[in-house]
Image (tube, helix red, strand yellow):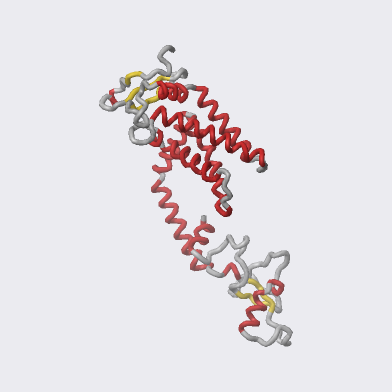
């Protein structure tokens, strides 16, 4: 216990030719650090760096950060009010303090085991930078940057060792599924191309009332005919539901006085079910 949170010589043979040291926390977790000067001024026995290491490896520090993240997530799902919005300054300050402790304890980026050598810390760095960019600034259309606050929930992955291991295993599994993913994408592309050839434009076919011959809609010109067919009041159906039709044998037939015409109105399901382009066809096949 008396050696807890104290810099110790790294006895791992794998790192014997590297400048590293280890610190054992009170929870008996081992943390490895670079023995070079952090920020070029803080050697491993510098009082400031010793305090930063003590805070970083202390179990209560991780618990405090996790509780902060959970509280932040709870406030993010609440209706936006001036009071809730004002708490962002506090949370940003806590996350900045956490990053500052890590940088002083580990160093920034140049040496192994430093702050930005951990990919999860890049997420912290980006989230904090965006928080300062959006803080107190009216961004207009760029206010969507505030949605990046939800990435703070991912900070828990970097803090909880077991969760970090699970996520790493999932990522490695996805890498091993690379060939399966490629085969699946290729198969879907084949079906998308088939749908593109067979159904392009077909899903816009509708039963449209025949153009009146009594002249009530004007003379039969291309412009008048197009306006007549574009008017959804002349389509067979109701409540914005227009059944598909076809001119081939066995296809949906139109009632007398209507003709099945292609190219007017949206595709079904508000335009999402479509085979008019490869992208939409791929999505429909998926």
User: Which quadrant of the structure image shows residue 25?
Assistant: top left
- Give the residue furthest to the left: 17
Q: Is residue 136 above or below residue 33?
A: below
Give the camera-side residue of 216 and 65: 65
Q: Is residue 70 above or below residue 140?
A: above
Query: What residue is drawn where x is 56% and y is 46%?
Result: 146
Query: What residue is drawn where x is 34% and y is 28%?
Result: 37
For the N terminus, the image quarter is: top left
Query: What residue is drawn where x is 32% and y is 28%?
Result: 36
Find residue 188 and report its horizontal and vertical position in percent: 47, 56
Q: Is residue 76 above or below residue 12?
A: below
Is residue 247 left or right of 286 when viewed as pictured? right
Give the camera-side residue of 35 and 216: 35
Number of on-image labels: 0
Is residue 44 left or right of 274 when viewed as pictured? left
Is residue 193 left or right of 81 when viewed as pictured? left
Find residue 246 and report its horizontal and vertical position in percent: 61, 72
Query: What residue is drawn where x is 34% and y is 31%?
Result: 40
Find residue 192 and report its horizontal and vertical position in percent: 48, 61
Find residue 27 and report its horizontal and vertical position in percent: 47, 19
Is residue 249 left or right of 99 when viewed as pictured? right
């Amino acid at each position: 216990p008396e050696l807890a949170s104290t810099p110790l010589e790294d006895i791992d043979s794998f790192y014997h030719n590297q400048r590293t040291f280890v610190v054992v926390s009170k929870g008996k977790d081992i943390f490895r650090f670079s023995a070079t000067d952090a920020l070029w001024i803080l050697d491993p026995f510098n009082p400031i760096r010793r305090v930063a290491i003590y805070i970083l490896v202390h179990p209560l520090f991780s618990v405090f950060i996790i509780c902060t993240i959970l509280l932040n997530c709870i406030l993010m799902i609440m209706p936006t009010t001036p009071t809730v919005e004002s708490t962002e300054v506090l949370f940003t300050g806590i996350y900045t303090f956490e990053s500052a402790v890590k940088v002083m304890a580990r160093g920034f980026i140049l040496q192994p085991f430093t702050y930005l050598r951990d990919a999860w810390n890049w997420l912290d760095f980006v989230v904090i930078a965006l928080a300062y960019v959006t803080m107190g600034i009216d961004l207009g259309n760029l206010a969507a940057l505030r949605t990046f606050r939800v990435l703070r929930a991912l900070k828990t992955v970097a803090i909880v060792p077991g969760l970090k291991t699970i996520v790493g295993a999932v990522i490695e599994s996805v890498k091993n599924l690379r060939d399966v993913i490629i085969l699946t994408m290729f198969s879907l592309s084949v079906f998308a191309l088939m749908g593109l050839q067979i159904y392009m434009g077909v899903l816009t076919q509708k039963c449209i009332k025949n153009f009146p011959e009594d002249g009530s809609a004007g003379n039969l010109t291309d412009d008048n005919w197009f306006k007549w067919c574009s008017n959804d009041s002349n389509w067979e159906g109701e409540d914005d539901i227009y059944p598909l039709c076809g001119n081939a044998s066995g296809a949906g037939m139109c009632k007398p006085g209507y003709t099945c015409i292609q190219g007017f109105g949206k595709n079904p399901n508000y335009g999402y079910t479509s085979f008019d382009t490869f992208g939409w066809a791929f999505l429909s096949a998926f």
